[in-house]
Image (tube, helix red, strand yellow):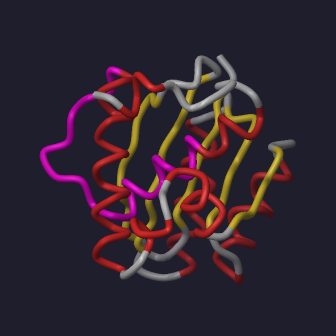
């Protein structure tokens, strides 16, 4: 089944994989010691996920280029966005003020998406994984796998 991989970029990376049914398949946080280990990790991850057709990256710079280069070589469509893109879509301006408030809002919505998708509940949810979940939700909405944000997700 085609899928979309969302990445909150950094050496501490958040990852979220969505299926074409717009449901979250898995999510996690991954730490890479340096760019060399990141490069190997990206290659290995994309090797294990041949169904990925879309890659949504939050951020830019050399780390984004590592992801984009490997993905494009595989024919994966790459889209780079800023945090403001997905935050604006899901949160009121008051929920975006202040780093702590923004992280809390992301955590709450990410947990709703996990539940709605039937994905395993986290014992703990790192903020980079929570943000990757929302980056991915933004992506499935953008490519049309989910026509609109369901009230079901918001009301869990």
Asked which quadrant contains residue 38, the reply is bottom right
- Tell me the residue at 57%/63% (across/down): 40
User: 91 or 2, which lies in front?
Assistant: 91
Left/right of residue 53 with respect to residue 155 in the rendered view: right
Q: How many marks?
A: 0
* Residue 108 vertical placement versus 23 (above, below): below
User: 119 or 137, which lies in front?
Assistant: 137
Quarter of the figure with the N terminus: top right
Residue 145, given in percent of the width and then of the height, sits at: 69, 25
* Residue 4 vertical placement versus 104 (above, below): above
User: 22 or 148, which lies in front?
Assistant: 148
Left/right of residue 137 with respect to residue 11 in the rendered view: right
- Tell me the residue at 45%/28% (across/down): 25
Left/right of residue 25 with respect to residue 6 in the rendered view: left
Quarter of the figure with the C terminus: top left
Residue 50, given in percent of the width and then of the height, sits at: 67, 32
Asked which quadrant contains residue 33, the reply is bottom left
Residue 106 colored in magenta in the image: no
* Residue 62 vertical placement versus 4 (above, below): below
- Tell me the residue at 64%/21% (across/down): 20
- Tell me the residue at 70%/82% (across/down): 62
Residue 134 colored in magenta in the image: yes
Left/right of residue 6 with respect to residue 75 in the rendered view: left
Residue 75, given in percent of the width and then of the height, sits at: 86, 42
Residue 27, given in percent of the width and then of the height, sits at: 39, 43
Magenta region? 118-137
* Residue 119 vertical placement versus 86 (above, below): above
Asked which quadrant contains residue 120, the reply is top left
């Amino acid at each position: 089944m085609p899928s979309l991989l969302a990445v909150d970029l950094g050496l501490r990376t958040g990852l979220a994989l969505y299926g074409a049914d717009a449901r979250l398949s898995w999510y996690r946080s991954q730490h890479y010691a340096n760019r060399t280990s990141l490069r190997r990790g990206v290659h290995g991850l994309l090797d294990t996920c041949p169904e990925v057709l879309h890659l949504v990256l939050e951020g830019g710079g050399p780390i984004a280029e590592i992801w984009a280069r490997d993905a494009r070589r595989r024919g994966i469509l790459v889209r780079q966005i800023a945090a403001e893109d997905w935050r604006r879509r899901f949160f009121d301006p008051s929920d975006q003020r202040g780093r702590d408030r923004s992280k809390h809002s992301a955590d709450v919505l990410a947990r709703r998406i996990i539940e709605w998708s039937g994905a395993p509940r986290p014992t703990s949810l790192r903020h980079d994984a929570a943000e990757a979940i929302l980056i991915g939700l933004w992506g499935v909405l953008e490519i049309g796998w989910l026509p609109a944000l369901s009230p079901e997700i918001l009301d869990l």
